[in-house]
Image: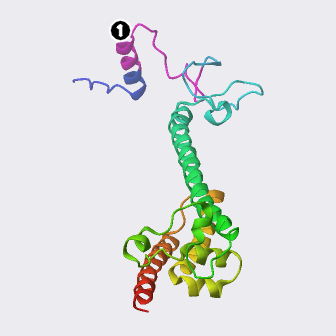
Amino acid sequence: MQKHQKTPSKKNRNIEIGQLSAQNSDFPPLSQQEISDNGTKNGKPISGLPSDKPPQPGAETTNFDQSGSGPFLAAAEAVVTPVSKQTASRQTCLRVAAAIVALVPLTLLIIAGNLNPEEQGLGTHQQLGLPPCSLRLLAGIRCPACGMTTSWSYFAKGNWLASANTNAGGFLLALLCIAMIATAAQVFRRGHLPSPRIQTWLTIGGAGVLAVTLVDWIIRLQS
């Protein structure tokens, strides 16, 4: 009778695989009994394997949040720093422009308020040493800007009715300058442009001032 050949058990197969691995490796093989479930060999921890034991107090740990010098944090700082500098530079330029926009009309209104408005409604600018209107000297007619300084002088002194009667376009332009000064002050304080809605209204206001100035000039030519 032929004897049945015994099938190698799972334990024997593991031993054979370990022996074959030992022949192809520079390190001595480790049996299943030598390595426990918690990653230790004969009670000693094996380097490179995770341990279930909590870290001891004072032990060094690799934590990017604690050290603050992780590669991801360094890369983020390298990107954020130039952007922050660019934003600060842009806000500085915007504030300088806003200051100029606010100071120019404010200075003109202060100067106009220190002048004595002429009773004839024009020629007030000659008190500053400026020459008379060239169109009046050459053609004998007033230009659209004639009476503008007089209108602003009345406006700065609080006589808004006389300002509108002298030059309607000048009166509306003074009102628009007040709105521009207030808007520029907000831009200077916040460091960013006004909303698109405010920009649209200022643009419409400028177009309206130009239209009213031309209409008022045509009416005065015919009168």
Secondary structure of residue under mark 1: helix
Q: Mark 1 Cα within 10 Å, few/some/many (few <14, many 20+)? A: few
In x, y percent, where is residue 146?
A: 49, 75
Q: On the picture, is 57 further left or further right than 111?
A: right
Q: Report if residue 77 is visible in the image.
A: yes
Using the rendered view, name the quadrant where residue 43 is placed: top right
Q: Residue at x 37, y 23 (%)?
A: 13
Q: Is residue 53 above or below residue 21?
A: below
Provide the residue designation for mark 1. 23
Q: Classify 95 as above or below 203.
A: above
Q: Which of 179 and 138 is in front in this view?
A: 138
Position in image of residue 164 (x %, y %)? 58, 85
Which residue is more in the foreground, 56 or 93? Answer: 93
- Examine the image and state in which quarter residue 208 appears: bottom left
Asked if 117 appears above or below 75 in the picture, the reply is below
Farthest right residue?
A: 57
The amino acid type of the residue labelled 1 equals Gln
Rendered-image quadrant of the C terminus:
bottom left
Q: Give the range drawn in magenta.
A: 15-40
What residue sits 69% from the left and 24% below the top?
A: 60
Compared across the picture, whether 40 is left or right of 86 comes to right
